[in-house]
Image (spheres, grey):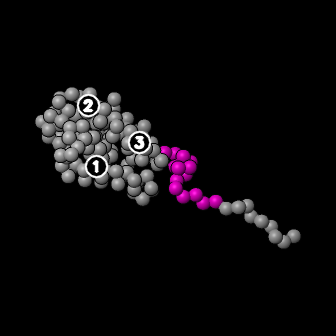
Amino acid sequence: MSQFIQSEDYDASIHSEILGRLTRDDDAVVEICEDRAIAEMRGYLSARYDVDAIFSAEGKERNQLILMMAIDIAVYHLFCIHNPQKMSQIRKDRYDRAVEWLKQVAAFKIAVADAPLLPEEKRDENSPWLMKSNPKRINHL
């Protein structure tokens, strides 16, 4: 169970009565979808960022952009439980936007401001770019 997303965080993305109907007021379903959303995000963010520090943050310490993307992904998964054929286009678009953003972060094209980075050596190992050369040769004696 993650403490990263709180129940009141959903108020900015979905009305509580809609969330209650989607989950039939079962908080366990919400927690499962939150955990799935965080697991999905960890895969994309782990190359550059300290995901343990990001997702263990609480309250005002949480990165608001990452929180917004996590909620969008969790809400998408909640809607998929109910009736994926009649899902509103905005939910699909927000999920697609979140995944595209995560792909850009994973490709080192977008940086997440104020997110805790991994140590530099670990980031270099995970970087998609590698620069090295052969040892210098001595051709003249």
Spot occupied by residue 43 in the image (x, y as percentages of width and height):
43, 44
Residue at position x 20%, y 41% in the image: 83
Which callout, 2 or 3, points at the residue further toward the start of the chain? 2
Q: Mark 1: few, some, or many residues within 10 Å (few <14, many ≥20)? A: many
Residue at position x 53%, y 50% in the image: 126
Residue topped by disc 3: 42
Q: Mark 3: few, some, or many residues within 10 Å (few <14, many ≥20)? A: some
Q: Amino acid at mark 3?
A: Arg
What is the distance, in whole Å, between disc 2 and disc 1 at their CAs? 18 Å
As drawn, is 140 to the left or to the right of 91? right
Mark 1–mark 3 contact, CB under 8 Å? no
Task: Classify mark 2: helix, strand or loop.
Answer: helix
Q: Amino acid at mark 1?
A: Tyr
- Looking at the rendering, the stretch of residues picked out in magenta corresponds to 118-132
Spot occupied by residue 13 in the image (x, y as percentages of width and height):
19, 44
Circle number at residue 29: 2
Comparing marks 2 and 3, which lies closer to the viewer?
Answer: 2
